[in-house]
Image (cartoon, rainbow, N blue to C red):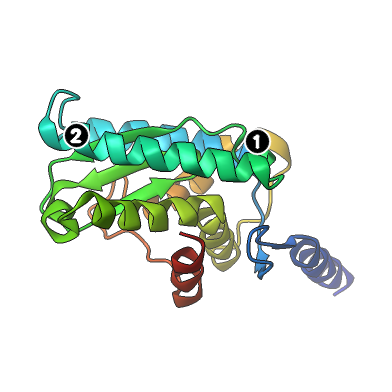
Amino acid sequence: MKKYLAVFGLSIALLFNSCSTVPLSGRSRLNLVSNDQVLPMAFQAYSQFLGENKVLPASNAETRRVKAVGDNLIAAVTSYMNSHNYANLIKDYKWEVNVVQNNEKNAWCMPGGKIVVYTGILPVTQTDAGLATVLGHEIAHAIAGHSAERMSQQMVAQGLGAVGGIALSRDPKAQSIFNTLYGVGTPLAMLSFSRGQELEADHLG
């Protein structure tokens, strides 16, 4: 009994100490993973995703258009973060924009600034302003750490505790949870963000 109580107490302490706030909005959230842990997983998942899908070449007209809009947004985000003392949140970002041939109406931005736009959403966005609105929303998800938050929730649900330091990024189970967030390496649909996270991304984006 004492053993179980000790484990329970340790778990409660872990969850309590893992509560944080979204820097740009002040909302409280559970966060078991840091940028040092989640970014290597994001970079690996992004490379895997690009390898599994048809990426339009840089010379493609749609790619040039999307990258131009994306680059302008990235410059604006970087300037804002630097001028509002949030530079530390994106200091390890390796921004990248790719367009994937896929009829699904979707776009996303992984932690670390890894952006994908599906061709299926381009007719919906219509203009550069429409595309910028979509990308701004997705970048806001990344800046606000929503993926790390969703991953933390999945870790708790699956009984995977926090692992110290960078070791978590090498944990196959943790990588699998992250990949599932974006539908990488699986036929299953990517896990959706919560309603609150979507509203927060709307506000920040």
Q: Residues within 10 Å of mark 2 (few under 14, many from 20)?
A: many
Q: Does the rendering let one see residue 172?
A: no
Spot occupied by residue 148 in the image (x, y as percentages of width and height): 56, 54
Name which quarter of the figure residue 15 lies in. Answer: bottom right
Can you name the residue that lies furthest to the right here?
Answer: 2
Q: Quadrant of the N terminus?
A: bottom right
Q: Would residue 160 appear left or right of 6 to someone viewing this image? A: left
Spot occupied by residue 198 in the image (x, y as percentages of width and height): 44, 69
Given this view, does label 1 or label 2 mark the residue nearer the observer?
2
Query: What amino acid is labelled 2 in the image?
Result: Thr
Spot occupied by residue 39 in the image (x, y as percentages of width and height): 54, 38
Q: Would residue 43 appear left or right of 132 to someone viewing this image? A: right
Name which quarter of the figure residue 99 lies in. Answer: top left
Estimate the spatial distance between the alpha carbons at disc 1 and disc 2, rounded to whole Å.
36 Å
- Label 2 sits on a secondary structure element that is helix
Q: Quadrant of the C terminus?
A: bottom left
Q: Does the rendering let one see residue 41?
A: yes
Query: Residue placed at 14% from the left, 37% from the top?
Result: 62
Query: What amino acid is labelled 1 in the image?
Result: Ala
Q: Residues within 10 Å of mark 1 (few under 14, many from 20)?
A: few
Task: Return the residue at label 1.
Answer: 167
Task: Return the residue at label 2.
Answer: 63
The tag earlier along the polypeptide, 1 or 2, is 2
Query: Residue placed at 47% from the left, 64% from the top?
Result: 201
Query: Residue placed at 46% from the left, 73% from the top?
Result: 199
Q: How many marks?
A: 2
Name which quarter of the figure residue 16 lies in. Answer: bottom right
- Decide: is 73 above or below 28: above
